[in-house]
Amino acid sequence: MNKTYSLDQLTDVAKEVIENAQHKILLFYGEMGVGKTTLIKEICTVLEIEDIAHSPTFSLVNEYQTKKGEIVYHFDFYRIEDENEALDMGIEDYLYTNHWCLIEWPENVKNLLPLETVEIHISLLEDGKRNIQLK
């Protein structure tokens, strides 16, 4: 999937990400402010989580439950300085559950991630639109 979108198309993009994801571990790459958290919140809405999604910048992970009883984990590793911090919080316990794992700043824990993931690269274009690529 390689697509250019505006924010009013966010729901459709979130649905496409879910439909095209070959694995439930989604790695979100992009500069600060590009819209990673915004897209994750919309993915959580499409997955029908029961809570309001928000960034786990300080807690590292938020856990949500969908209306169907599925678990969704949202990670934000922006503030991680050492991968041991992620090990200390039990990252492996989350990654190998077969639940949705939506990970911002995965490059900060790259040595701990399983091989079966989906990379999502988001970039901001000059016209305010975004480009998204799934790998």
Image (tube, grey):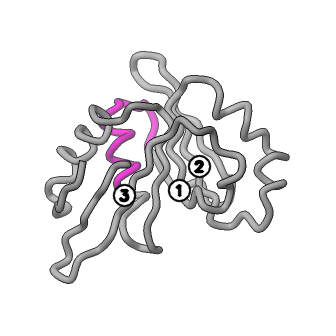
- Residue to which mark 1 is pinned: 104
User: What amino acid does circle 1 point to?
Assistant: Glu
| Among the two numbered marks 3 and 1 on one chain, the one whose residue lies closer to the N terminus | 3
- Residue to which mark 2 is pinned: 75
- Image location (x, y in percent) of residue 18: 32, 35
Q: Nearer the viewer, mark 3 or mark 1?
A: 1
Give the residues in magenta: 39-52
Element carrying mark 1: strand
- Vertical relation: 57 (above or below) 98: below
Residue at horizontal 27 percent and vertical 44 percent from the top:
14
- Vertical relation: 132 (above or below) 61: below
Element carrying mark 2: strand
- Residue to which mark 3 is pinned: 38
Real-space Cα distance between discs 3 and 1? 11 Å
Q: Is residue 37 magenta?
A: no
Real-space Cα distance between discs 2 and 1? 6 Å
User: What amino acid does circle 2 point to?
Assistant: Phe
Residue at horizontal 53 percent and vertical 35 percent from the top:
116
- Image location (x, y in percent) of residue 75: 59, 49
Residue at horizontal 19 percent and vertical 70 percent from the top:
129
Q: Residues within 10 Å of mark 2 (few under 14, many from 20)?
A: many
CB within 8 Å, label 2 to label 1: yes
| Among the two numbered marks 2 and 1 on one chain, the one whose residue lies closer to the N terminus | 2
User: What amino acid does circle 3 point to?
Assistant: Thr
Element carrying mark 3: helix
CB within 8 Å, label 3 to label 1: no
Q: Residues within 10 Å of mark 3 (few under 14, many from 20)?
A: some
Q: Nearer the viewer, residue 121 or 40?
A: 121
Q: Is residue 41 magenta?
A: yes
